[in-house]
Amino acid sequence: MSVIRLLVLGAVRQHGRAHGYQVRNDLEYWGAHEWSNAKPGSIYHALKQMAKQGLLVAHETAPSTAGGPPRTEYEVTEQGTEEYFRLLREALTSYDQKPDVLSAGLGLMVDLEREEALALLERRLASIEEWRKAVTEYYVPEDGPGQLGHIGEIMDFWIHSADTGAAWTRGLIARIRGGAYTFAGEGEPFVGVLAEGEENPFATGQPHAGDSE
Amino acid sequence: MSVIRLLVLGAVRQHGRAHGYQVRNDLEYWGAHEWSNAKPGSIYHALKQMAKQGLLVAHETAPSTAGGPPRTEYEVTEQGTEEYFRLLREALTSYDQKPDVLSAGLGLMVDLEREEALALLERRLASIEEWRKAVTEYYVPEDGPGQLGHIGEIMDFWIHSADTGAAWTRGLIARIRGGAYTFAGEGEPFVGVLAEGEENPFATGQPHAGDSE
DNA sequence: CCTTCATTAGTCAAACTTGACTAGCGCCGC
DNA sequence: GCGGCGCTAGTCAAGTTTGACTAATGAAGG
């Protein structure tokens, strides 16, 4: 699973109706350009692809009021909503060692109810534990480690990442259980997107003129 | 930078001369199919691409002795060696939050001399520190955290990853400084590839018949 | 006024990745 | 003595990602 679809669905959903450039700005607001592959090309591609697959509906609109080419607005369909929650649940649950997926899940978790988020994170802990057991069994066989030479450092690194990841997840669970943040069905949600015209207070300062890297 | 090129160059280089299937097996031996996108398609693609770019030379050989289509053997050129070390140094130094890149670097670090590996890992610590400072400055502005709501958890997660990653790197530096492993120019190198016909003692047990996932 | 420059909005070709597929050969069981 | 399974070795089309590019508008500065 690529994280782009989850992010794009999440952004469009929060707006109700959004065009590509808005999504692009939201992802920058979330810092996603730093921790995921959220480049313009990927975003526009995901929008078109998901529209083709029926997860989004596209509305052609008049040329924008503020210059630039005509823009297309998108809305999430029922099927898209289903897919969104499927991806979101998977992002929070599965330990696939892709930190960008978890990050996206964190940014969007408040679309779930508090109890479900907690349950998913508990399942995440379980799957980390499972992964850890599988790895140590396969890669530290009969004769103990050391047979592997420096290759063993790779395993050690992954185990270490799994362990510290689990510890962090426990902390998060505690914070959520302690009442932090506003989840679905708990009143006024946290505004996680930029309104039209609002500027990003967390922008990098470096304007992305021409989009080149 | 994609990690595939580094892995493939490293594997071919250790053999002197290798065909695609050998590389594929080495990467499985290193566990790379678990922590990177080392699928057959990517490997063969990287081989062809790097041959086209002059980093490898291709030798067509007779149909293999053990069935299957005719195989192509590759050797690393001088230019390829340069590129290999460039990628390897970058993998060990830069903190780009892509754990697969570091893993590949760990698996291949013994191609460098001990002192250089240590220097690169020290630089890695510095770049983690730098990254951490940049991030905390941007994302915890005037009014302190909490403005961000649950979005702040993403930042917290990344900071936590950076800190535990730095701690682990310090441990690795200590082990290497303490004399662990055999680096370049220190006599008999650790055999990091499978000889022709040798079986992988760390295979997953699940045969990859048909390669489907 | 008129040039320059950032912003808005998006496209495109080239490269890469994915997952499924092909095809020859040997060996094991029946 | 042959049918299927697994291993060797690789190809391919479809999908995704990348980085560079385009084109329109409006504000700022001279």
Image: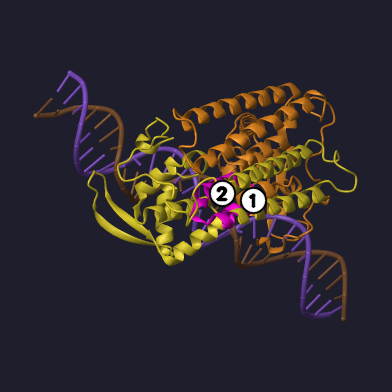
Chain colours: A orange, B yellow, C purple, D brown
User: In the picture provided, is A162 more to the left or to the right than B191?
Assistant: right
Residue highlighted by disc 2: B101
Give the vertical position of B67 relative to B94 (above or below): above
User: In the picture provided, is C28 more to the left or to the right than D23?
Assistant: left
How packed mark 2 is, by other alpha carbons closer than 10 Å (few <14, some 14-19, many 20 or more), is: many
Are dots 2 and 1 in contact, CB under 8 Å?
Answer: yes
Image x and y of residue A148, in percent: 47, 39
Residue found at x 82% / y 29%? A180
Chain of the residue that carries numbered disc 1 in the rendered image: B
Residue highlighted by disc 1: B96
Residue found at x 66% / y 36%? A102
Residue A34 vs residue D8, the one in the foreground: D8
Give the vertical position of A50 relative to B7 (above or below): above
How packed mark 1 is, by other alpha carbons closer than 10 Å (few <14, some 14-19, many 20 or more), is: some
Any part of residue A58 in sight: no
| Number of marks drawn | 2
Any part of residue B185 in sight: yes
Q: Quadrant of residue B152?
A: top right
Image x and y of residue B212, in percent: 40, 36
Q: Quadrant of the C terminus of chain A?
A: bottom right
Badge 2 and badge 1 in a common chain: yes
Residue A204 vs residue A64, the one in the foreground: A204
Residue A32 within the magenta-colored segment of the rendering: no
Helix, strand or loop at label 2? It is helix
Range of residues picked out in magenta? B90-117
Residue B91 within the magenta-colored segment of the rendering: yes
The kind of residue on which mark 2 rests is Val
Q: Quadrant of the N terminus of chain A?
A: top right
The kind of residue on which mark 1 rests is Asp
Image x and y of residue A143, in percent: 45, 30
